[in-house]
Image: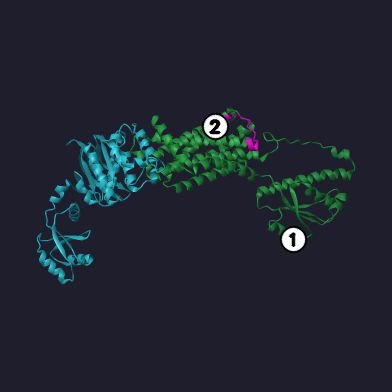
Chain colours: A cyan, B green
Amino acid sequence: MNEIAVEVKGLKKSYDKVDAVKGVSFSVSKGELFGLIGPDGAGKTSILRILTTLILPNEGSANILGYDVVKDYKKIRNNIGYMPQRFSLYQDLSVEENLEFFAQVFGTTVKENYDLIKDIYIQIEPFKNRLAGKLSGGMKQKLALCCALIHSPDILILDEPTTGVDAVSRKEFWEMLIRLKLKGITIIVSTPYMDEANLCDRVALIQNGTIMKIDKPASITSEFGRMLWAIKSENIYKLIQDLRQFEFIDTVYPFGEFIHITSKSNNMDTNSLISLLKGNNHSKIEILEIQPNIEDCFMALMNN
Amino acid sequence: MKKILYILQKEFTQIFRDKTMLPMIFGVPIIQLVVLVHAATLEMKSIDMYVIDKDLSSLSTKLVNKFEGSPFYTISGKSFSITEANKEIENNKADVILHIPYGFERDLIREKSSEIQLQIDGINGTAASLINAYSTSVISDFNKDIVVELTQMPQLAKIEPIAIQTSYWYNPELNYKTYMLPGILVILVSIISLFMTAMNIVREKEMGTIEQINVTPIRKHEFIIGKLVPFMIIALFELAFGLTIGKLFFHIPIVGNVGLLFGFTLVYLLVVLSLGLLISTLASTQQQVMFISFFFMLVFILMSGIFTPTESMPLWAQKVNIINPFYYFMRVIRMILLKGSEFWDISREFFSLLIYGTLMLGLAVWRYRKVA
């Protein structure tokens, strides 16, 4: 299980004057589901494009299954499946034609590896004669995954596969990934959605081209090491403003309908906070102590 | 090798699925050949002539009648006023003014010589020189007639010290269509190969499909062959299709060896397809391809000698034509079709293009590797 599938060392990539990746190192074991988590522009796509041999790094090295991404790119291309962020199959070819074409250029047939894609393909099979450009977003994504898998790659690399996909399809998609992992495929996936981090075996938190932390999602959250409260009231905007005024409050981040806060002393009398807020004309105040999630950790790491 | 076949299969599926493609392949040649061959003619069929006959003698009337009787001239108006006549030219109502001065007949009889004036609208230089040539020939014809009449010695008139018998080789009737059709075929074949190749490759970039192709084991040369071969086949088909139309509807002569023509076209396509590939590496959107290829095509077409003989260009322009692939093809297609030239007659062009094509392909592939 601990055999290394992907090894990245001191990777750097810059475009003109912008440093997209500033010395990134990590390794992925065989059969692992590894997540690159970070906001847009963090450098995720650049890292994945280097791994898929599409662009060359300026510095550092990366190897996949022992093959160097620069020198042995031909061997790597036979062993990886890549699903780019943007749908990049032939829109003017049908579902079936796309799948067949990609099978053929990898020197295999759809039949040969049908087992691997069966679960996914069965969902789009009713539309197999439809042009890929005419599919819905979720179906396009399934087709793209099928095409990335059709040559039975050892490693699957997915660039933000769930961006712009509805919540149900997102959940389905991750279920598919986990099933693929169980078949022994190493998966590297990038996503800006922090909630998806928990579904990975290990994640790398990326910000501004550097990795802030690499660990199991559970370890990352357990290392948060501080008390965290979620708080809400009727006027969220004013609440944020007010909370930031208080001396004893450390961080204030909005999370959906709640605001996550930490205190400087790492301890807080919630009742006195409530009465303080009531003094500021807040009503329907709710406050509860919560376990930190990946996003909280991300925010905390970002501030360090 | 098998992979290339799969790529070709995919390309053809896509090309024929494209709704604009089939009309382009069949419609464009028909329209271009039918319309352009008829329209882009240098024959002047209706020259509007304005007449100022101040003499109003029998000889001057005879001259005017001679023009009127010619199929090329229409008398658009007559008057005695030069201002009136100039106005007609300015308003585009007349192409030429025939001015016969007072005393024309008298001078001719008494002094055996007389003068008339032709004023030609010179806006279009080509048309003006044609009108001049036509008019001069009508007048010299008239000259001959009156010599006979005036001298009353018919035998004298027949004595012509040097008889000029003109015969035009390879196009005896100076049929304009025979000359234009091969030229238009050149443009047609070039557009298909240059434009479509570049557009097709850039579309893969625009759609992002090239990303997906690049992570497959498809090698660059396989991809390039897969892109160039379909358009080469289509271009050759266009040539055959255009020649068939030319033969059936315009009865153009096909004197030379068609096989040789296709062989030469293949070498020509090597250059043009490579240029298309090169353009595709310079552009990242289809719009940019349009601009770049329009630039090249316009220069190449105008300098190719389709309308004007390249020999009449300034020397520097003739030198520049060395890098104009259209120029070679324009020359050779006419040589083979009209003259029946053999391989050795066109070998200079053949080998020039072969070297040119090899260099061009090398450059394009090198550029392609660098950017992709």
Residue under pointer 2 = B264
Give how far apart the Cα atoms at labels 1 and 2 are. 57 Å
Quadrant location of the N terminus of chain A in the rendered image: top left
Instruction: Label 1: state its secondary structure.
Output: helix
Say whether residue B255 is magenta: yes
Q: Which of the two residues, A193 or B120, is positioned nearer the viewer here?
A: A193
Which chain is indicated by disc 2?
Answer: B
Q: Look at the image and tell me in which quarter the C terminus of chain A lies.
A: bottom left
- Can residue B59 be seen here? yes
Residue type at tag 2: Phe
**Quick one: which residue is furthest to the front in this view?**
A126
Q: Is residue B167 left or right of residue A112?
A: right
Look at the numbered discs 1 and 2 and tell me whether their residues touch, using CB distance below 8 Å. no
The answer to whether residue A53 shows anywhere in this view is no
Q: Position of residue B351 (x, y in %)?
A: 53, 31
Q: Which mark is residue B84?
A: 1
Q: Which residues are magenta?
A: B248-258
Instruction: Return the x and y of residue A109 as percentages of the image width and height.
Output: 34, 32
Q: Residue furthest right?
A: B152
Percent of width and height locating residue B17: 46, 41
Q: Which residue corresponds to the image point at 88% horizontal and 38% vertical from the top-left?
A: B155
Could you tell me the amino acid type at mark 1?
Answer: Glu
